[in-house]
Each structure stands twice: as C-alpha cells, then as structure tokens.
Image (tube, helix red, strand yellow):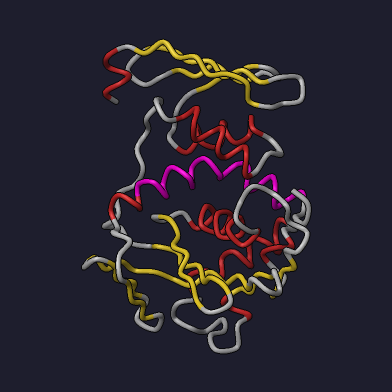
Amino acid sequence: MAGFSPAFERLGAALAAVVLQQQETLAEFLPREDWSADLTARTYTSGGVTVRISLLGSYAVRERTWLWGWANPPFGAAHPAVVPTLLLRTLGERLGITEFTTPEVDLSGYEGPAGHGGELMAMAAGGVLGGAGYIGVGYDGGSAYLHVDDPRVPAAQWDPVPLPRLLANAAGLFPREPRLTLAGFLSHHRIAYRQTDMRTEVMLPGGGTAHATFDGLGRFVDWKAELTPAAVAT
C-alpha cells in the first residue's frame, strides 16, 4: 500500500473491519437517492432522510491529493462542519500520523484495491471519530467525504456470520496486520479472545467458540465457528 506511513496503515488495519460493518448499517438506514447538503447547518438529506454530518475532506482526481476540510480555504478550522473533525489533527500530532496533520496529502503513490487513496483516508478518519459512518459525494473534479455523526443511525451490532467476509475485505484494503484488524473488531464489540502468532480463539457471546487462522506471514487464512443457537441470536 505505497504512499501511506506505517502509523497510518496500522491505524487503518485496526479500524477497517469496524468501519466496513458500520458502512453497511448506514447504507440500510440512509437511502442513496437525490441528495442535498447544507454544511453550515451540518445536514445531509437523501430520500427524505436527514442526518447530521461534518466535513472530513476531499479527494481531487486529477491531482490525486486529499485536502482536509480545515485546510480548505472556503471552510477552515472554525467552520461548523469542520470543528468536530479537529480531533483527527490532534491525534495525528500525538501519534505521529502525518496523514492527519498534513493539509494536503499526496496520494499519487497509492496503487491498492480501493478506488483511490482518498477512500482510505475517509475510512481511517471515520473510524477514529466513531459515529455512524461516512458518505462520499461527487463534485466536478473529485469527491468530498462527510462524516455522519447522528445518534438516530443504528450502531452495527455483533454478528459472527459476516465476520470472515468483513475481515477479508478489510485486510484487502489495509493488509499490514490482519490479526490487528480482527482484534480491533472483537474489541469494538467487547468480545473476549485469546491470540497467538498463528491463531485467534474467540469466545462467542451466549456460548460457542470460533478460531481464526493466520499463515506464517500473518495473513488471514480461515475462520471456523461452533455456534450455539444462543450465539447466533446474539
């Protein structure tokens, strides 16, 4: 995943599965139809549903750069839609994540499976902020990314069934540490687990266990679960 710092890749790996699951929940709640946005009022409306949002940043297709909302002259750090995102810059300064502190991030070196590097910037930023997910909206020359911060949107719930798919998809986008991706997902849902170099044993709520297997390079290989009826219903 050329173009990103190791600190950013590790953060993305820890958050990716959580973000992907929440994106699916957001898609079920928010219709993707004709939409409108009022950044000053911090609202986004689609299909008759309105949610509260903030502005993360934007990706320019031609330049292949990401511009943070706080660095965009028409907005800036004091704009109502930007203020809720400033935590990202503070965290970047504290943890040495240069992608969160650089006003305009050069993503021309990204050659991974995502449509472009801006999608991964939005994923990592949205994961740090929590909330209900993020929305990409196109404009002439690129895409702006909005963070959904609205308690009316349901939070994704623990479900062991789609976990292998989520883990595989997350590891495809942030391949640095799949074991960290699984650990981040389990910790987010407060699921107990025991981890070794090659295997993670998961204690499923309501009974039952599951095992995730990794190869010698740390790549996700297999997921096997022994589910009780109570565990499936949880």
**Going by the picture, which residue comes out furthest to the left?**
48
Q: Provide residue 196's location: percent of width, then percent of height.
A: 67, 18
Q: Provide residue 103's location: percent of width, then percent of height.
A: 69, 75
**Quarter assignment of residue 94:** bottom right
- Magenta region includes residue 49: no
- Residue name at image x 58 percent, y 54 percent: 124
Q: Would residue 102 be found to the left or right of residue 50 on screen?
A: right
Q: Main secondary structure of the magenta part?
A: helix
Look at the image and give the residue range highlighted in magenta.
6-25
Q: How many marks?
A: 0
- Magenta region includes residue 16: yes
Where the C terminus falls, by quadrant? top left
Q: Is residue 198 above or below residue 85?
A: above
Q: Is residue 129 above or below residue 234?
A: below
Q: Would residue 165 be found to the left or right of residue 49 on screen?
A: right
Q: Provide residue 160's location: percent of width, then percent of height.
A: 41, 26
Q: Nearer the viewer, residue 46 or 191?
A: 46
Q: Provide residue 62's location: percent of width, then percent of height.
A: 68, 74
- Residue name at image x 51 percent, y 57 percent: 126
- Residue name at image x 24 percent, y 66 percent: 47
- Residue name at image x 63 percent, y 17 percent: 199
Q: Would residue 179 be found to the left or right of residue 133 on screen?
A: right
